[in-house]
């Protein structure tokens, strides 16, 4: 018979540890914080709450030893890898979620799909963001309009047993490129392999001056993948 100490203090009762087989086990990140300011990376940083997952990520992708980092989430371990790209498995077009969000201090103020608002109380109402692509970017930059939020759910092609990972990006360049990715996934109409990568882009400013560069995420579909044995299970997203 198990201990009953939690009956007298239910608030302190530990939450059951969820199985990593069917739950999200970590996040792929394209940046980190330096003195409270965001900085981009040219190689993947992976965070997880499971030491075994962290060790396997390092084995597969190289990089530094897993270390702890300050976070309010459960993924308190981070691995700065040596890999700018990784082969992943996507469960078709549904593995990619897109929305536009205007964030406030206390959460989302407004969400839309670019044409209509999608938050419950305003669902179906016309989007308040500008119509043109550049005006949308300018409005988002000034804090007046929604910014993109693209979330990708996947497993690693070389270690599917680890479980599902997530990558989220607000990249406007990914917004442009994701159309090609979705089109390829729709043609396959099933599980697919793809490269999830970070690409350094160098450009010359329109007003002149020294060349600049930025890192953009890319998702290049490779081809169809075998159907997983648990394909009938509903994915956790």
Image (cartoon, rainbow, N blue to C red):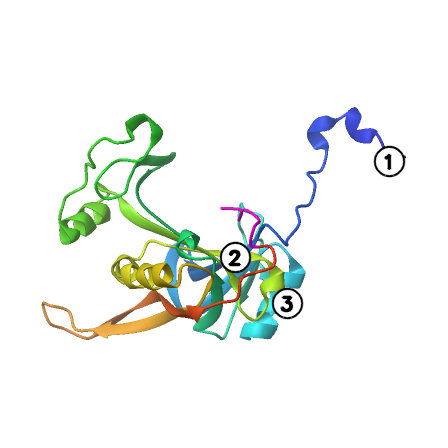
Indicate the position of residue 172 as horizontal and vertical percent values. 26, 57
Q: Earlier in the sequence, mark 2 or mark 3?
A: 3
Quadrant assignment, res 120: top left
What residue would you read off at disc 1? Answer: 2
Quadrant assignment, res 59: bottom right
Indicate the position of residue 233 as horizontal and vertical percent values. 57, 49
Structural crowding at the residue carrying mark 3, measured as other residues with C-alpha within 10 Å and reported as few (<14), some (14–19) or many (≥20): some
What residue would you read off at disc 3? Answer: 55
Start-end of magenta stretch: 231-237
Indicate the position of residue 86 as horizontal and vertical percent values. 47, 71
Residue drawn at point x = 22 percent, y = 42 percent: 145
Above-or-below relation of 149 to 82: above
Q: Left or right: 123 with respect to 26?
A: left
Residue found at the far right of this picture: 1
What residue would you read off at disc 2? Answer: 165
Quadrant assignment, res 115: top left
207, 154: nearer the viewer: 154
Circle count: 3
């Amino acid at each position: 018979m198990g201990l009953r100490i939690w009956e007298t203090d239910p608030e302190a009762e530990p939450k059951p540890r969820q199985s990593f087989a069917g739950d999200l086990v970590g996040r792929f990140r394209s940046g980190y914080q330096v003195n409270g300011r965001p900085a981009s990376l040219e190689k993947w940083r992976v965070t997880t709450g499971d030491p075994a997952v962290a060790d396997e990520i390092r084995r597969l992708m190289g990089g530094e030893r897993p270390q702890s980092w300050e976070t309010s989430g459960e993924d308190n371990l981070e691995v700065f890898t040596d890999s700018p790209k990784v082969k992943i498995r996507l469960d078709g077009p549904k593995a990619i979620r897109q929305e536009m969000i205007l964030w406030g201090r206390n959460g989302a103020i407004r969400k839309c799909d670019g044409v209509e608002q999608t938050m419950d109380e305003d669902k179906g109402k016309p989007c308040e963001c500008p119509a043109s692509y550049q005006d949308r970017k300018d409005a988002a930059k000034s804090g007046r309009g929604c910014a993109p939020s693209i979330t990708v759910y996947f497993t690693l092609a070389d270690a599917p047993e680890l479980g599902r990972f997530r990558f989220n990006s607000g990249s406007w360049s990914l917004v442009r490129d994701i159309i090609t990715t979705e089109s390829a996934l729709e043609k396959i109409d099933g599980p697919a392999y793809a490269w999830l990568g970070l690409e350094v882009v160098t450009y010359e400013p329109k007003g002149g001056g020294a060349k600049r560069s930025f890192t953009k995420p890319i998702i290049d579909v490779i081809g169809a993948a075998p159907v997983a044995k648990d394909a009938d299970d509903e994915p956790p997203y």
